[in-house]
Amino acid sequence: MLPLLQGKPRVAILAAMPNMLWMRVVSTIAAVAVPAASAPPPAKIVPFSQTFYGTVRSDPYHWMESGGPDLSAYLTSQSAYTRSVLAANPGRPRVLQAIRRAEAQANTASTTSAAIRVGARILYLQTLPGSNDLSLLARDDGSPNANVVIEATSLPKDRVIGWFEPSPRGTKIAYGVTAASEAVVIHVCDADGSHDTAQAIDPAVIQDATWRDESSFYYNTVVEGKRNRTETSYLHTLGSKHGTDIAIAGFGANGPMGSRTLRNLWTTYTVLGRDAVVAMPLREPTPHLSAFVAPFARATHASGPWRRIFSEADEVARVAVGGRYLYGLSDKGDARRTIEIRDRFTGAHVRTILPDGNGFRKDIFANKTGVYVAKRIGGNMQLEHYDLEGRVLGDVALPRANVILPIQSNPAADTLAVETASFNDPGRWYEISGPHAIVRDAGISPPLPASYATIRYDDATATSADGTKPRTRSSTKPAPRKMVDGLLS
């Protein structure tokens, strides 16, 4: 639920280094004698406990989560101690030089994080050469080059783009600018990045926004208290004054999705054009959702009218919307999850799709032509394809499906954006379109480094103890026989 900070710390950069670079850095560090040092400044201990699923968990350092002068003083003392130890090390300059060389090489590769299609345009987050932070780019169909909408270097220091969401027609883009404190400021700009303005919304932990139309959107805030966390969902209108946003769900909101207690309630939305709005609240600590539907014109306040389609008793962990139906992945009755289909106009049960005996259904997505279910089988994943009525259409033939990462779907579109990856390869983005699930390269993945060209993949089928036959894939990279700086790479 917390926003993903896209800036990579130096430790993360080192973890992503090729083996050869690690060997050079480690060999350099090994040659440095580090003298013994006194203990670092201790952190104070403040008794604190929370109960999760009936189990009491103690966290004496919970006080750090709220920040404040005590945390700042502690971090300052830790920094001073660290610098004193490093300054006393005569071999530090050589180690630092090796790290900077490796860091510079790692920065030459780009990574793509999220992709959303709007009409003939695809928007995505990608690191640009020389930067560890994500920029917002756009590529029009038929164009070989992308345009930079928001560049990471244009943001204030220590600020990164955590997420973005285009409006239904793509005329506006909302995006979250995240600070190290995890507080997010929501900005809105035009499609080309112009007329960028911070909205009159208090900085808070805000994971995303969902546009209602071209001039308003829903968003969630998290407020961390000394003992509890409260979450509220609001409707914001562009140009509105500070403090005038309308509470729709969560703490302090009236109506079926409201909560008068400090119980957490996180809500996500799907807007079906000018037809309806689907709200899906998640009440912690339960992992199960409710799903409500309200007419578009009346989905502007907490009282709705919001019609409940799925309740917590249905034990639905994921929900998707397609056509006139809501699709839920339910834990009820089978740990591998059933697919429950409900009519969103009447709430009537339409169909239950039982597991086929293989794998665990992890997530579900839908658009205006079909339903897709990401299923894990052993160490691999595959994508099941159904029509909107729930009839099986088979598996989607993805080029590489060791891992299927978050899918960006839009119930009003006929395409999905999906990222596939393996443990040895960076992610590659594809688009799946039409009733026949045609797969094509999205054209936004960075080029593969030359070092990946020698990797060989071998597919096989294994038989597990219960008789299921999961597909497996192994990867092999021949070891080069080259001496560099006296080391065998």
Image (cartoon, rainbow, N blue to C red):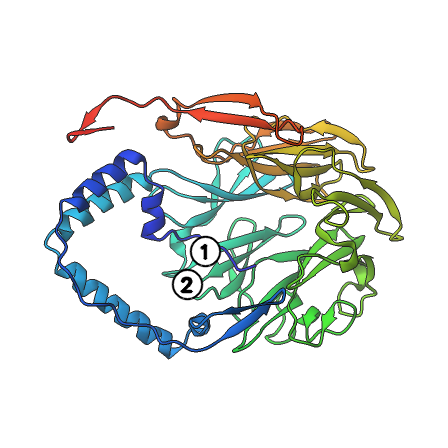
Q: What amino acid is found at the position of numbered circle 2 in the picture?
A: Ala
Please state the horizontal and vertical placement of residue 129, each as a whole percent of the image. Answer: 36, 41
- 326 versus 235 height, above or below: above
Please tell me whether residue 406 is drawn above or below residue 469 in the rendered image: below
Residue 56 position within the rendered picture, expressed as x and y whole percent measured from the top left: 56, 69
Q: Quadrant for the N terminus, please.
A: bottom right
| Residue 441 in sight here | yes
**Residue pushed farthest front?**
465
Q: Give the amino acid type for the residue marked by disc 1 in the picture.
A: Leu
**Of marks 1 and 2, which one's residue comes earlier in the chain?**
1
Across and down, in percent, residue 454 comes to 38, 21
Task: Name the disc covering residue 5, or none.
Answer: 1
Please name whichever residue, 262 or 247, is drawn nearer the observer in this view of the structure.
262
Residue at the (18%, 48%) spot, across then down: 95
Residue 376: quadrant of the picture? top right
Q: Say which residue appears at 13% left-offset and 58% top-offset.
A: 35
Tell me residue 98's x, y (percent): 20, 43
**Relative to the observer, which residue lies in front, 371 or 29?**
29
